[in-house]
Amino acid sequence: MRALAHKAWRLLPEDMRRAGMTTAAAIIAPRPGPAPAHSRGAVVAGDNDGHYGIAESGRVIRRALATLGLDRGAIPFGLPSVVPTQRENLPEGAAVIAVLNAPLLPVAGARLPRGLLQGRRMIGMWVWELPVIPQDWRIGAKFVHDVWAPSRFCADAFEAAAPGRVHVVPYPIAAVPLAAPLGDRAHFGLEQNCFVVLCAFNLASSFTRKNPLASIAAFRAAFGNNRDALLVLKVTGAGTHAAELALIHAAIGDAGNIRLFTGDLPEAELNGLLAASDAIISLHRAEGFGLIPATGALLGKPVIATGWSGNLDFMAPESSALISYKLVPVVDEYGVYNVRGAHWAEPDVEDAAAWLRRLFDDSTLRQQMGAAGKAHAERALGSGPLQAALAAAGVTG
């Protein structure tokens, strides 16, 4: 009977399964009481060792807290299939910054010892990639006092779930030292005298949303088989997404100037690959923030990216290549983003191809755009918003 029930559960659409899980967990998970007026530092709670964007954002927040003298440690917090159960006590009086999206908060909270979070200020650090949120985010909003959004784009969406409690807190990656780039072109097997374009993404973060096929199409439209240009596709999660990987291989075809890397890289090596490139491209359909374009910009690389969604908080037309687009209804074959009334961007491949050719032809433009983009990102991604949000929440040393 249990096997049949599990099979029936798996047949339900993804959004229905997620909403059902959140609703059930919300019944048993303890809700935080009134928020204390003051907290002594903060603990970061989430998937502290994960190799994807939201996990990395938690590590960035913790490093920034350390520079402010407010870091009180980290605890595992999330689904049982992702993180271990938390069995330790928390530092007395510390706030908790839950780097975990709203639908998972009740599930994660139900796994904790009862009373562990009582009397603490709970802050949810969320990220979402559409202008509207699914219904189950409203349930998760009951388990936090404040919501931090990494971009204005996200904040506008979260207001529907937590009106008046949302603060824009961009990931402060310019306020903490980036891992020193490790590896040069020889290390990665890249040609020295070649225009290298990097497209890096995680297949677990939605193949459809990341839209790598558009980057491949733009590169091929710009250069054909010209070996003076090279597109590097750095793909994480290939081992568990065979169907998507097959689509990438089909799009590459017989192109000898497109190279595919599927292994995991430590942060320093990933930064080395970014630093070894001449330009970064992200023709996403939507981003809540965009860690790869942001890191590329801070490393002084010109960034070509869809001119819509969260990346606009650290990219501007005068300092980056913002690609034109049209808004279209969301069609997500995996069901994660199929929210009623939602839309996202369809970037203009020809516009992207034209920018690739411009940057290929003009090394001075590459240098100027890289320098301007770096300066703009440094201004946008400092610790100021984080410090303001901590002060508003009463988090002090």
Image: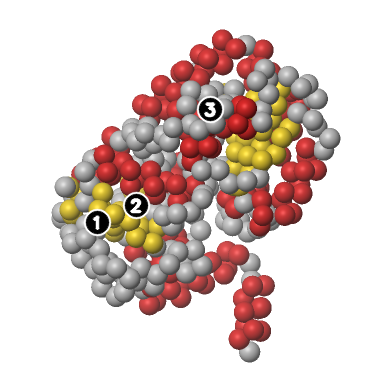
Instruction: Examine the rendering and report whether any part of residue 34 can be seen.
Output: no
Is residue 305 shown above or below 359? below
x, y percentage for residue 255?
Answer: 80, 32
Residue 60's image quarter?
A: top left
Alpha carbon distance from label 1 to label 3:
36 Å
The correct choice, above or below, for 168 with respect to 368 in the image is below
Label of residue 95 in the image: 1
| Tag 2 residue | 147
- Please give the residue where the numbered disc 3 appears in the rendered image: 275
Colouring style? secondary structure
Residue at left 41%, top 34%?
178
Q: Quadrant of residue 366?
A: top right
- SS at mark 1? strand
Determine whether, in the image, residue 323 is placed left or right of residue 153.
right
| Residue at the image point whose x is 55% and y is 43% from the top | 265
- For the residue marked with disc 2, what is the amino acid? Val
Image coordinates for residue 33, horizontal then vertical, percent: 23, 67
Precedes in sequence: disc 1 or disc 2: 1
Q: Name the N-terminal-most of marks 1 and 3.
A: 1
Residue type at numbered disc 3: Ala
**Which residue is at the far front?**
187
